[in-house]
Image (cartoon, rainbow, N blue to C red):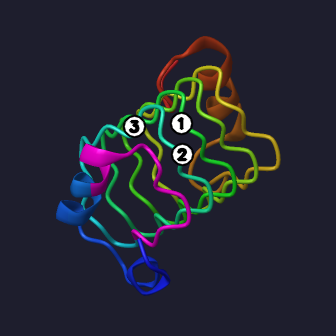
Amino acid sequence: MSKEEKSQTLSRKEVLEILAESKDLRDLDIRKANLIKVDFSGCDLRNTNFSYANLKEAYFKGADMREVSLWNANLEGADFTDADLEGADLDYSKMRGAVLYRANLRRATLPTELVPREDILRSVKTGCKVGQK
């Protein structure tokens, strides 16, 4: 993929086409895309920009998401089990119902204005859904 292709914002269709061939989605601009229920499990998503994307019920199991931007994304019901979110920007993201079991959140910016930090950490530890006991 050329630099010009990487610099434009990708659509759902384009993301699914890439996923059909590769698990490497590093450095892509996927802002505002509608990616409900897309399976990114095991993908390399380092430095990908998912700002404002709709990732409701998407799967990120075991994904490498270091330095990813999920700023203001809809992550309701998404599964981040074993995902590496070190340095990720999750600020203003909607996380109700998301599962963060064993996810690495070191240096990640969390949406603590919207969800209590304790709820997020409980999900990391126990696998419960964010916002539910």
Q: Residue 96's quadrant in the figure? A: top left
Q: Which residue is mark 3?
A: 78
Dot 2 or dot 1: first in sequence order is 2
Q: Is residue 22 magenta?
A: yes
- Vertical comparison of 113 with 132: above or below: below
Q: CA distance from mark 3 to mark 1?
A: 12 Å
Instruction: Indicate the amino acid at tag 2.
Output: Asp
In the image, the segment drawn in magenta is 18-30
Q: Residues within 10 Å of mark 2 (few under 14, many from 20)?
A: many
Q: Residue at x 47, y 44 (%)?
A: 95
- Vertical comparison of 124 with 4: above or below: above
Disc 3 secondary structure class? loop
Q: Residue at x 24, y 41 (%)?
A: 37
Q: CA distance from mark 2 to mark 1?
A: 6 Å
- Vertical comparison of 64 with 87: above or below: above
Dot 3 or dot 2: first in sequence order is 2
Question: In the figure, is residue 128 to the left or right of 34?
Answer: right
Instruction: Indicate the amino acid at tag 3.
Output: Ala
User: Which numbered dot is residue 44?
Assistant: 2
- Vertical comparison of 130 with 47: above or below: above
Q: Residues within 10 Å of mark 1 (few under 14, many from 20)?
A: many
Do callouts 2 and 1 mark residues in contact (Cβ within 8 Å)? Answer: yes
Give how far across and how far down residue 73 sits, in percent.
44, 60
